[in-house]
Image: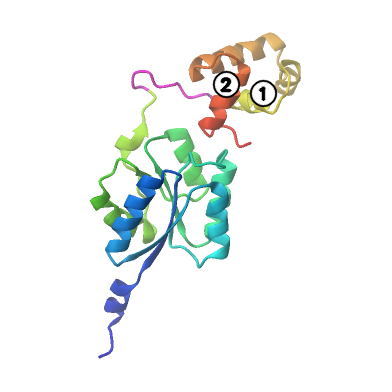
């Protein structure tokens, strides 16, 4: 008996690449999805393995990407995954995400955020939503900068100063670039360190990379 187009669509298996270095989480998610009979799952534990899978395997429908996996440094890596995924939908897979990083990722083509705290039973419907091209961003998974202990966001000038600082440029160079004096740049740096909870400019650069505020 010939199958109808609807039956063919239901029978289709969704190919998922789970890029996460937490093996226990990866195994649990992969087992759950595979047991439904509706998903084929491959895993990668580093950024390098993720790119290798995207380049050497069949096209994936969905890529679940952990921002904190080894080798993934800055948003340029996220852009690379989106590009290599082609028509596949890339979604962040993280315990929490700050709004700045998520917004930048979405601008690059990421389809939202799946929190690691989400009940496994809800993953199937969420992945089907993302696979259809829809966005998924649960508001309770985003860090609220107004909550207690949360870092303030840097303004555009402070982000620019932080990125120049992380590139090894001196206050004098940055001052000339901004057409400001060095005292003003030092004030920017004090504000940056305060907002990021950094001890000094080098520590601020480290925190900035960890928060994906710096691309390199």
Residue lying at 33% horizontally and 37% vertically, measured from the top left: 141
Residue 134, horizontal then vertical, whole percent = 37, 55
Q: Considering the image in quadrants, where does the N terminus appear?
A: bottom left
Work out whether mark 2 precedes mark 1 in sequence or the reverse, and give the earlier one. Answer: 1
Q: Of helix, strand and loop, which mostly describes the magenta segment?
A: loop
Image: magenta residue range = 146-155
Residue lying at 70% horizontally and 22% vertically, measured from the top left: 178
Q: Residues within 10 Å of mark 1 (few under 14, many from 20)?
A: some
Residue 53 vertical position relative to residue 78 in the rendered view, above or below: below
Residue placed under numbered mark 1 in the picture: 165
Q: Residue furthest top?
A: 183
Residue 101, horizontal then vertical, whole percent = 48, 36
Residue 98: in magenta span: no
Residue 79 seen anywhere in this rendered image of the structure:
yes
Q: Nearer the viewer, residue 22 or 172?
A: 22
Looking at the rendered structure, the secondary structure element under dot 2 is: helix
Residue 199, horizontal then vertical, whole percent = 55, 13
Residue lying at 55% horizontally and 42% vertically, measured from the top left: 72
Between the C-alphas of marks 2 and 1, the distance is 9 Å
Residue 113 seen anywhere in this rendered image of the structure:
no
Number of residue marks: 2
Task: Determine which quarter of the picture holds residue 55.
Answer: bottom right
Task: Determine which quarter of the picture holds residue 216.
Answer: top right
Q: Is there CB contact under 8 Å for labels 2 and 1?
A: yes
Q: Residues within 10 Å of mark 2 (few under 14, many from 20)?
A: many
Looking at the rendered structure, the secondary structure element under dot 1 is: helix
Residue lying at 47% horizontally and 45% vertically, measured from the top left: 106
Residue placed under numbered mark 2 in the picture: 204
């Amino acid at each position: 008996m010939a199958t109808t187009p609807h039956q063919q669509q239901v029978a289709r298996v969704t190919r998922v690449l789970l890029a996460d270095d937490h093996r226990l989480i990866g195994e649990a998610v992969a087992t759950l999805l595979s047991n439904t009979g509706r998903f084929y799952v491959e895993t990668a534990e580093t950024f390098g393995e993720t790119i290798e899978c995207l380049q050497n395997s069949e096209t994936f429908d969905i890529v679940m990407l952990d921002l904190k996996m080894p080798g993934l440094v800055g948003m340029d890596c996220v852009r690379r995954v989106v590009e290599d995924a082609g028509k596949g939908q890339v979604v962040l897979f993280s315990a929490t995400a700050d709004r700045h990083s998520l917004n930048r990722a979405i601008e690059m083509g990421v389809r939202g955020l799946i929190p690691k705290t989400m009940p496994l039973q809800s993953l199937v419907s969420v992945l089907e939503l993302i696979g259809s091209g829809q966005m998924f961003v649960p508001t309770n998974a985003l860090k609220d900068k107004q909550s207690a202990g949360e870092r303030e966001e840097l303004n555009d000038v402070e982000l620019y100063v932080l990125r120049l600082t992380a590139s090894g440029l001196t206050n004098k160079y940055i001052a000339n670039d901004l057409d400001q004096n060095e005292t003003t740049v030092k004030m920017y740096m004090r504000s940056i360190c305060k907002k990021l909870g950094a001890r000094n400019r080098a520590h601020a650069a480290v925190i900035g990379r960890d928060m994906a505020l710096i691309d390199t």
